[in-house]
């Protein structure tokens, strides 16, 4: 588990963003707006899942002062004990994870309020909330595994944005700061849910299934919400909108070409 820091983001979120705040580009603005719409409910799901997961872990594996951790790659039987160092590591990492995610949820909720005031409708959140109910009353490893998969995917996107932030070219500086701050913290806590999932005995086959399902849903939902945002914006059928979209998705520095390798790995 890596060390994560909960930061305060000191930017102006009271002044509404410009209609096309991302460099005057309708498609890039609509795409980033779509991502932001997914975060508040998603972040709350991640917080609840990891909190429940680590609580289950600490209850099933009580503290032992001198018991060594299981060998690398060996799954817990549920009867092993946690050393003081393991307990402190899990509790510290999860506390930081929850702090960062709660801050992301709050910041994007403030941003999304401006989008709603402009007439954009958040359909992604409603679909996500329906899917989340599938996990109610089920094995805690389900929501933790789904969280780990989503955090893995967002960390790939975060590293892409941090490594080559051309998608934010010309954007309002305060929102460049917001997205790079969010991306940085995603890379910091990317392994927290994964570590909890493995400690709970989550297996590799299910991890891969979760990742494929999450990827499919993310691609579909992000495109649906982006298109809906463009429709409300009145720019859906403009040629330059889809020229920009092609460049973002399939261009030399676009998402598909750049992220295919990291996604496979």
Image (cartoon, helix red, strand yellow):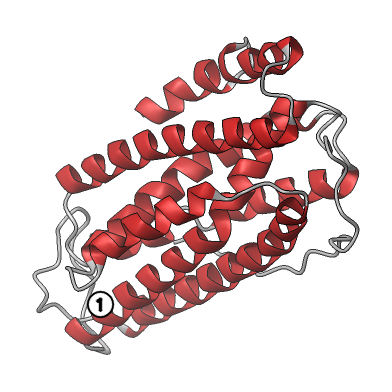
Residue 140: image location, x then y, percent: 23, 69
Residue 257: image location, x then y, percent: 52, 15
Question: For mark 1, what is the residue?
Answer: 57
Quadrant containing the C terminus in the rendered view: top left
Tell me the element at label 1. Answer: helix
Q: Residue at x 22, y 63 (%)?
A: 141
Query: Relative to 83, is 193 on the left or the right?
Result: right
Q: Residue at x 21, y 67 (%)?
A: 200
Query: Relative to 249, is 171 on the left or the right?
Result: right
Residue 114: image location, x then y, percent: 77, 56
Residue 129, quarter of picture: bottom left
Query: Relative to 20, is 77 on the left or the right?
Result: left
Quadrant containing the N terminus in the rendered view: bottom left
Q: Residue at x 61, y 65 (%)?
A: 105
Query: Relative to 119, is 51 on the left or the right?
Result: left
Q: Nearer the viewer, residue 127 or 24?
A: 127
Any part of residue 17 in sight: yes
Residue 136, quarter of picture: bottom left
Q: Nearer the viewer, residue 263 or 82?
A: 263
Q: Nearer the viewer, residue 168 or 121?
A: 121
Residue 209: image location, x then y, percent: 22, 41
Tell me: residue 98, above or below residue 216: below
> How many numbered dots are placed on residues in this image?
1
Tell me: residue 90, above or below residue 15: below
Residue 148, quarter of picture: bottom left
Tell me: residue 126, above or below residue 252: below
Any part of residue 199 in sight: no
Tell me: residue 170, above or below residue 14: above
Query: How packed is label 1: few (under 14 Cα within 10 Å), some, or many (20 or more)?
Result: many
């Amino acid at each position: 588990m890596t060390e994560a820091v909960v930061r305060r983001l000191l930017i102006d979120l009271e002044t509404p963003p410009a209609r096309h705040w991302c460099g005057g580009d309708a498609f890039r603005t609509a795409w980033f707006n779509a991502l932001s719409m997914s975060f508040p409910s998603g972040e709350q799901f991640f917080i609840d899942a990891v909190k429940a997961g680590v609580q289950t872990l600490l209850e099933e594996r009580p503290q032992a002062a001198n018991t060594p951790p299981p060998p690398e790659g060996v799954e817990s039987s549920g009867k092993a004990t946690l050393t003081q160092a393991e307990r402190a590591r899990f509790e510290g990492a999860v506390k930081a994870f929850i702090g960062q995610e709660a801050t992301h949820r709050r910041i994007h909720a403030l941003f999304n309020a401006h989008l709603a005031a402009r007439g954009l409708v958040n359909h992604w959140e409603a679909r996500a909330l329906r899917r989340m109910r599938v996990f109610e009353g089920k094995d805690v490893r389900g929501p933790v595994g789904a969280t780990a998969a989503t955090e893995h995917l967002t960390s790939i996107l975060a590293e892409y944005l941090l490594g080559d932030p051309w998608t934010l070219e010309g954007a309002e500086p305060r929102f460049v700061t917001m997205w790079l701050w969010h991306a940085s913290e995603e890379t910091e806590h990317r392994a927290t849910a994964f570590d909890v999932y493995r400690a709970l005995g989550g297996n590799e086959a299910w991890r891969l299934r979760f990742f494929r399902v999450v990827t499919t849903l993310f691609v579909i939902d992000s495109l649906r919400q982006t298109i809906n945002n463009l429709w409300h914006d009145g720019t859906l059928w403009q040629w330059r909108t889809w020229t920009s979209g092609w460049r973002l998705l399939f261009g030399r520095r676009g998402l598909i070409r750049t992220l295919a390798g990291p996604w496979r790995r």
